[in-house]
């Protein structure tokens, strides 16, 4: 294994938010990989952000994600200006959002200004791409993917779709839930197919969203409303796939009628609605996050149900943790692809990710149990809602406050 040095190459497959954040942390933090050459391959075209259009794809980002992006100098300058803060969150089952089977979270209860921010995907990608363009040792290739990989303890050889062959000290797979690189590396996964899809769109409403994220658990899956800066809400509606297909095929009026009924009128009359996008949902967890000279991050390592809006947040914690481990490797004179370095990253992230994945999966199953389980769910929600300690714990956990993966970033920023 070659020691980390100026001739080191780190190849990142996937220029999604997680892959771009790994790259940005590596080149922007002088203590991590200031002299390594970092190359990102993204199979799609470059992300373009149009300030006059609200991207259909948005993420609810936690405080931990905000801090990671802030450590790159991107939060205050760019992202915060367009991000929509949410200060309350209401979760319920049944007809009444304020009834027995409901939970209400408020940032003021834990002395925080908000519970997170809604950020657009294209803005996040565009901002990270712009940052990377400022560093001579970072290179982004669009429309290029990896065709084959040979990885050993001495490094990785990758053949690219443009015919090139690249030798890298480390290959980072950040190519999403259906990761091709993970398959090429032959890393086993535990997967669960819940036969669900999510429909995503932005909708205007009669009542103001009042900076509140809403989530109603329905027997078919959860329906969430995330508040946007333009006054509309972004919906994430998880449904059995056949039902999602039926709703996708409806004209706007028919879709709005179904959405109105599913919303329980919590935001009054809904409409107009933007174009809808459909995502197939599935839970995947890689049993190993690393192979010789290669490592998985973000959805390539774990994709979780969107019901708690945590997939991106977990991926950004992976990015922060991997960057910190690579920084330590460089300081010790180890190689970036050293198996001990990659296993340390795996140990630090796998337990955290698995806990969250199992919790969301259990929650999804619990709420899809037949109506006879409803009194039990109402009792459980009521107990949590009345317990300030439990609610504080859940809010702090969801926000990622004081997450150990961020300590090295805080030290670097100090
Ligand atoms: C409906 C929905 C709502 C969600 N809401 C939230 C939320 O509110 N908050 C939250 O934290 N998470 C949310 N998530 C989860 C979140 O979308 C994912 O966890 C996140 O996108 C993972 O980021 P990533 O960069 O790892 O992967 P991706 O975003 O999937 O990016 C992977 C990138 O790799 C590229 N790629 C793929 N294959 C190759 C290849 N072979 N070579 C090169 N490039 C390749 C792709 O084009 C893509 O750009 C949601 C998910 C869904 C489905």
Image (tube, rainbow, N blue to C red):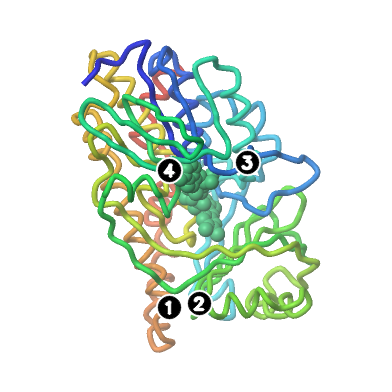
Left of 384 or right of it: where is 121? Answer: right
Is 383 on the left or on the right of 40, as rendered?
left
For the point 39% across and 25% down, the residue is 10
Q: Which mark is residue 290?
A: none
Query: Circle 3 sits on which residue?
Result: 45
Q: Which tag, 3 or 4, sits closer to the chain's start?
A: 3
Front position among marks 4 and 1: 4
Quickly name the residue at label 1: 368
Inter-mark Cα distance, 4 to 1: 27 Å
Residue 315, numbered circle:
4
Residue 189, picture quadrant: bottom left
Foreground pick, 164 / 176: 164
Sequence-first tag of 4 and 2:
2
- Tell me whether the residue at label 3 lies in contact with that at label 2, contact meaning CB atoms closer than 8 angstroms: no
In this rendering, which labeled residue sits more in front, label 3 or label 4?
3
Is 372 on the left-hand or right-hand side of 66? left
Q: CA distance from mark 3 to mark 1?
A: 38 Å
Tell me residue 390's x, y (percent): 37, 57
- Mark 4 vs ligand 1: CB below 8 Å: yes
Q: Residue at x 40, y 50 (%)?
A: 179
For mark 2, what is the residue?
A: 240
Q: Position of residue 109 (x, y in %)?
A: 51, 49
Q: Looking at the image, is mark 4 or mark 1 earlier in the sequence?
A: 4
């Amino acid at each position: 294994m070659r020691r980390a040095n100026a001739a080191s190459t780190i190849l990142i497959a996937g220029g999604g938010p997680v892959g771009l954040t790994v790259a940005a942390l590596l080149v922007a933090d002088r203590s991590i990989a200031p002299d390594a050459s970092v190359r990102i391959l993204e199979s799609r075209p470059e992300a373009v952000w149009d300030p006059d259009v609200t991207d259909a794809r948005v993420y609810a980002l936690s405080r931990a994600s905000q801090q990671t992006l802030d450590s790159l100098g991107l939060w205050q300058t760019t992202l915060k200006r367009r991000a929509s803060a949410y200060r309350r969150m209401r979760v319920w089952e049944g007809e009444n959002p304020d009834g027995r089977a409901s939970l209400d979270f408020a940032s003021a209860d834990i002395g925080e200004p908000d519970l997170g921010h809604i950020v657009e995907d294209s803005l996040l990608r565009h901002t990270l791409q712009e940052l990377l363009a400022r560093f001579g040792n970072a290179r982004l290739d669009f429309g290029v993917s990896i065709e084959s990989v040979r990885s050993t303890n001495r490094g990785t050889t990758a053949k690219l779709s443009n015919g090139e062959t690249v030798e890298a000290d480390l290959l980072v797979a950040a190519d999403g839930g259906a990761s091709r690189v993970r398959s090429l590396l032959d890393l086993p996964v535990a997967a669960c197919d819940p036969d669900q899809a999510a429909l995503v769109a932005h909708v205007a409403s009669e009542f103001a969203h009042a900076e509140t994220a809403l989530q109603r658990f329905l027997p078919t899956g959860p329906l969430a409303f995330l508040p946007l800066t333009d006054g509309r809400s972004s919906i994430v509606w998880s449904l059995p796939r056949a039902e999602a297909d039926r709703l996708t095929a409806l004209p706007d009026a028919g879709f709005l009628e179904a959405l109105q009924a599913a919303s329980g009128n919590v935001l009054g009359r809904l409409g107009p609605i933007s174009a809808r996008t459909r995502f197939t949902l599935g839970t995947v967890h890689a049993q190993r996050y690393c192979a010789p000279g290669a490592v998985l991050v973000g959805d390539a390592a774990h994709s979780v149900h969107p019901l708690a809006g945590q997939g991106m947040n977990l991926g950004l914690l992976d990015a922060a943790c991997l960057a910190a481990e690579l920084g330590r490797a460089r300081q010790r004179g180890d190689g970036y692809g050293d198996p001990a370095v990659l296993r340390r990253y795996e140990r630090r992230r796998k337990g955290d990710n698995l806990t969250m994945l199992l919790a969301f999966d259990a929650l999804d199953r619990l709420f899809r149990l037949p109506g006879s389980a409803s009194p039990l769910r109402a009792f459980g929600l009521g107990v949590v809602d009345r317990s300030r300690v439990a609610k504080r714990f859940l809010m702090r956990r969801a926000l990622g406050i004081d997450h150990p993966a961020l300590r090295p970033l805080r030290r670097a920023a100090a």
